[in-house]
Image (tube, rainbow, N blue to C red):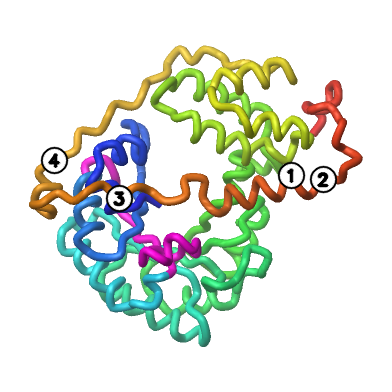
């Protein structure tokens, strides 16, 4: 989720929030916005590099709602409709315009009504997360509600929620008869999810280390480190995680994995670095004649990352406090 206002007003935000390469297709950029001008401008900025744009109406984080982003838009269906219509008018049919939603509070029919209205407004497809704004991740997703939405609209529907394994993806696909399944947190914890692996494989870890080494400054330390925390955090002992969370450079990470279990980055001979996107600056001037100050992104760690850190530090018993990072050979037996 890229914040449109920051993206439009700050070259630094554009450089840090979006990058791609010639093989990255199909590609959809998801924006958080609370008005049609902001998301239209950011969509036009990245349109040469993407195949579609998605409006986030599902983020439940308090900072996002306070700024009118994410779930806050569910209280303003007329604004969502205006954004979809605005985007649809300004892009060709082949360019997809989609919306990610959560279930509305109360009757399931209200969510169906909104989905039908967005279909009439020209949405290419919809994504539905099977919980309301107020339901936590421990709450089961409402499969029946998602199945009813699928029956009620003609455009494709992608379903989302609790997809932590490939089997879970298959089950929710069959139960809802959806056109696609989205995995988010499950893929953060296990990028090899759709291979059928139950947790991040050693080869997947190796590939991420390779990419982090080859990408150099194209991949920030924070992004590189965050993904490793999700991918590998629950396979570390408490003491090692505390050490790992305090790293500040990629070299710290490379040394850690080399010393702890003999994995080091491999040279990628055919690595092609991302080229900086050349954005048409006239778009910014068109929509913002008097350029305001850049709006910085909020909590950079994000609610889920912070909660994930707390979870993996608190769930283990103190009996494991002095365990080694990995017992000899155990890493390859998992």
Does residue 51 show up magenta in the picture? yes
Judging by the rendered image, the residue that carries numbered circle 4 is: 281
Relative to 160, is 167 on the left or the right?
Answer: right
Mark positioned earlier in the residue sequence (1 or 4): 4
Judging by the rendered image, the residue that carries numbered circle 2 is: 316
Q: Residue at x 30, y 50 (%)?
A: 295
Task: Using a 10 Å C-alpha cutoff, classify the residue at mark 1 as few (fewer than 14 neighbours), some (14 to 19) or many (20 or more).
Answer: some
Q: Report the mark closest to the observer, 1 or 4.
A: 1
Mark positioned earlier in the residue sequence (2 or 4): 4
Judging by the rendered image, the residue that carries numbered circle 3 is: 295
Residue 332 vertical position relative to residue 111 in the rendered view, above or below: above
Relative to 236, is 103 on the left or the right?
Answer: left
Judging by the rendered image, the residue that carries numbered circle 1 is: 313
Q: CA distance from mark 1 to mark 4?
A: 45 Å
Image spot of residue 157 (x, y percent): 44, 66
Residue range corresponding to the magenta coloring: 47-71
Task: Give the quadrant of the C terminus.
Answer: top right
């Amino acid at each position: 989720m890229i914040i449109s206002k920051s993206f439009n007003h700050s070259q630094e935000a554009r450089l840090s929030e979006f990058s791609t390469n010639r093989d990255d297709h199909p590609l959809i950029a998801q924006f958080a916005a609370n008005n049609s001008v902001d998301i239209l401008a950011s969509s036009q900025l990245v349109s040469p590099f993407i195949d579609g744009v998605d409006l986030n109406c599902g983020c439940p984080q308090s900072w996002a709602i306070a700024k009118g982003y994410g779930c806050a838009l569910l209280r303003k269906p007329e604004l969502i409709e205006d954004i979809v219509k605005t985007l649809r008018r300004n892009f060709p049919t082949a360019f997809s315009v989609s919306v990610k939603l959560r279930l509305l509070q109360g009757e399931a029919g209200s969510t169906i009504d909104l989905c039908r209205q967005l279909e009439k407004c020209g949405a290419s497809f919809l994504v539905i997360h099977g919980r309301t704004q107020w339901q936590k991740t421990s709450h089961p997703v409402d499969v029946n509600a998602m199945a009813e939405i699928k029956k009620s609209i003609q455009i494709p529907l992608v379903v989302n929620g609790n997809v932590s394994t490939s089997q879970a993806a298959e089950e929710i696909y069959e139960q809802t008869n959806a056109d696609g399944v989205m995995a988010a947190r499950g893929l953060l914890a296990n990028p090899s999810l759709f291979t059928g692996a139950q947790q991040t494989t050693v080869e997947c870890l190796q590939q991420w280390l390779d990419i982090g080494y080859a990408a150099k400054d194209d991949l920030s330390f924070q992004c590189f480190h965050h993904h490793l925390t999700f991918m590998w955090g629950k396979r570390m002992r408490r003491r090692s995680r505390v050490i790992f969370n305090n790293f500040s450079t990629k070299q710290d990470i490379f040394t850690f994995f080399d010393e702890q279990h003999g994995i080091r980055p491999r040279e990628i001979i055919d690595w092609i670095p991302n080229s900086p996107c050349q954005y048409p600056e006239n778009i910014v001037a068109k929509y913002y004649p008097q350029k305001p100050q850049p709006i910085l992104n909020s909590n950079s760690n994000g609610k889920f990352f912070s909660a994930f850190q707390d979870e993996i530090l608190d769930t283990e018993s103190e009996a494991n406090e002095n365990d080694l990072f990995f017992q000899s050979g155990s890493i390859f037996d998992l």
